[in-house]
Image (spheres, grey):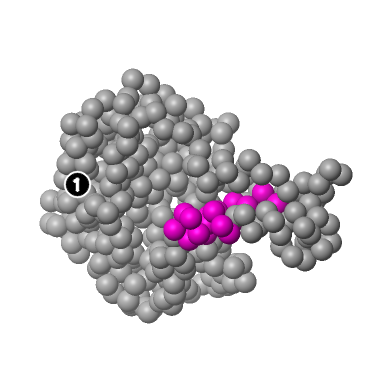
Amino acid sequence: MKKYKDFMNEITADELYKSLLAYGMFSEKLPPFLTSKNFYDYCQQNVLQFTDKPSQYVYYENMRNVNIPRPLGVPTPMAYQKLCKCLMDNWSEIQNYFERITNNQSHKVSRIHIRKIKGKNHIFEMNYSNWKVDPKPEEDLLIDKYYMVCADISKCFPSIYTHSIPWALVGKSVAKTTRRSGWFNDLDHFIQNTKHGETHGILIGPHASNLISEIILSAIDKSLVDKGWDYIRYVDDYTCYVRSEQDARQFLIDLQTELREFDLSLNHKKTKVSVLPLAATEQWVRRINSVSALTSYGKVDYKNCRAYIDYAIEISKNEDENSAVLKYAIKSLNGSELTRNAKNYM
């Protein structure tokens, strides 16, 4: 099984720069009508030095599955280029950091991170998985456990204090005594420039932000793993498997303590302790999978397509307007052969 460092070490500095700048400036939540590939080509063909100053960014909102808006941002290209170049120039230092900070892990704790993706130019996807090289460790973690703790960080990206990035990389005392020097402080500076000089929050959307957040979150992982907790993390969502309710409470205490070291906090509204075992698939997924839209001749016709989508809409309403239900249903239909009228309806 590949370790976290293996995924990072597969990426060269030039590949990192190209992927982040040419293919990672815009959130995958945006329809793919924007590209920064031409801007990357321009930067490669011209000897230039963009102005080193804070830049405004484009703010927009994207609706989550549960109809809560997520604040996203598009950075000014010149400011983002300088950030990407800083990451490229110091990529070996960052790779060494990730190798050192994750060497205590018996399994790969972080499940969503930058990586080479076969056949793709970008290096980050929220829902990417490859069972052959990155199998999920949940089955092993469940053994001899009776409770599952779910928790996440309150407004993770908007709450990240940019000065805490050097804290994670070299330690708080070193970072504070060398505020005007060191590549780690340069990184802090260029991150601020992409968000109009602000020290609180990093943009949600650009793939560089996902790499930057991992610097802090991996440091928190090291402390929690050293304390013996068996858990996995999907960006800022934690799932920990424990033997008792007391252990569940202690994990939340330890997690909150480590988050405070970086000026982050728990989202208590989403904290939940469940008794194991639990079904591996959500109930609404099983309900949708229990219904087939195929006709006797192997296609989905207009009548069945309409009934299937109506059924998904009904389930979605019963699941607090969770649009993930509709996305799942449409993807399921997309894998079938539809008649012309069924295609038009979908």
Whether residue 335 appears in magenta in the rendering, the answer is: no
Which residue is found at the position 48% from the left and 34% from the top?
280
Q: Is residue 330 left or right of residue 134?
A: right
Considering every residue shown, the one lying at the far top of the view is 144
**Residue 126 rendering spot, x and y as whole percentages:** 49, 52
Horizontal relation, residue 95 to residue 226: left or right: right
Q: Is residue 1 visible?
A: yes
Residues drawn in magenta: 313-334
List x then y, in percent, for residue 133: 55, 33
Q: Relative to residue 169, is residue 72 drawn left or right?
A: right
- Please tell me whether mark 1 sits on a helix, a strand or a loop: helix
The three-letter amino acid code for the residue at tag 1 is Gln
Q: Tell me which secondary structure the magenta stretch mostly adopts.
A: helix
Is residue 144 placed above or below 181 in the rendered structure? Answer: above
Q: At 27% from the left edge and 72% from the top edge, which residue is drawn?
A: 198
* Displayed quadrant of residue 53: bottom left
Across and down, in percent, residue 89 comes to: 41, 56
**Which corner quadrant of the image does residue 162 belong to?**
bottom left
- Exactly how many numbered labels are in the figure? 1
Between 132 and 320, the one nearer to me in the picture: 320
Residue shown at 49% from the left, 42% from the top = 282
Residue corresponding to mark 1: 256
Residue at the image position 18 percent from the left and 31 percent from the top: 246
Query: Which of the two residues, 91 or 310, is positioned nearer the viewer here?
Result: 310
Horizontal and vertical percent for residue 76? 44, 75
Asked if 50 appears above or below 124 in the picture, the reply is below
What is the quadrant of the C terminus in the image? bottom right
Residues 123 and 258: in front is: 258
